[in-house]
Image (cartoon, rainbow, N blue to C red):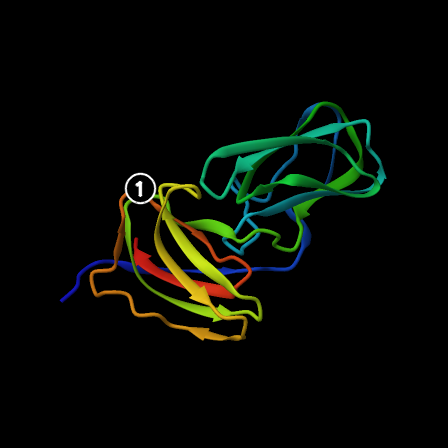
Amino acid sequence: MSVTSIKSKLFKAVSADTAAIAALQTLGGAGNMNLTGTSVSDGSNMDTTVTLTSGGNISGTNFTITGTDASGATVNQTIAGPNAGTVTTTQKFLTVTQIATNGAVGTNTSAGFTATSGTQGIVFAGATRVRGLHGVSSSTAGALIIRDGSQTGSKLLEIDTPAAAGQVDPYIPDEGILFRNGAFIDISAGYDSATIFFDG
């Protein structure tokens, strides 16, 4: 009888939310925006781009967004504030931990996420075994890949899909697949969603 603690995690794109990271606020000078949490994600468990939205012209103020990428590494990007609209990072973030400004923000400004734009995430950052998965394939051919250690690590599991919508429930051996340095997933365009079962 297995006594391992099995957990699951769903990887599925979500809609945009312009205030998910920080609600509308102003700053009297250089400083940090008040975030909605200490490590904010969009809820998809995948990486995506970050937005800043304001009704005024704050393009003279730079915002430095800091967080983690789909391998768990610290990343950041500095962008100018919006001019009565929305600006978007090119860097994709799995989580956001800080948004710092180099000057005052005189008009209410919020920070959020675009609709999920990436397909990569972290199943578990430490040693684990992937025990099973359930996927929903899209109309685009692709492959779900889980790597060891990072998004560029050794590929230990790959499940292809045809260019047809459907369900994917592959057989994985009873002992699962061991990822000694963490399991890092890319569901690609071939999957609308995937639920991964793993030791947690």
Residue at 45%, 75% (x, y): give it: 167
| Spot occupied by residue 184 in the image (x, y as percentages of width and height) | 41, 48
In the displayed structure, 64 sits above or below 122; it is above
| Residue type pointed to by label 1 | Asn
Residue 25 falls in which quadrant of the image?
A: top right
Residue 53 falls in which quadrant of the image?
A: top right
- In this view, the residue in front, 36 or 130, is 130
Q: Quadrant of the N terminus?
A: bottom left
In the displayed structure, 16 sits above or below 141; it is above
Query: Is any atom of residue 22 visible in this view?
Result: no
In the displayed structure, 107 sits above or below 143; it is above
- In this view, the residue in front, 23 or 10, is 10
- In this view, the residue in front, 120 or 197, is 120
Local crowd at mark 1 within 10 Å, few (<14), some, or many (≥20)? some
Residue at 28%, 50% (x, y): give it: 128
Residue at 47%, 68% (x, y): give it: 161
- In this view, the residue in front, 176 or 76, is 176
Left of 48 or right of it: where is 102?
Answer: right
| Spot occupied by residue 125 in the image (x, y as percentages of width and height) | 36, 44
Left of 124 or right of it: where is 64?
Answer: right
Left of 49 or right of it: where is 9?
Answer: left
Residue occupied by mark 1: 181
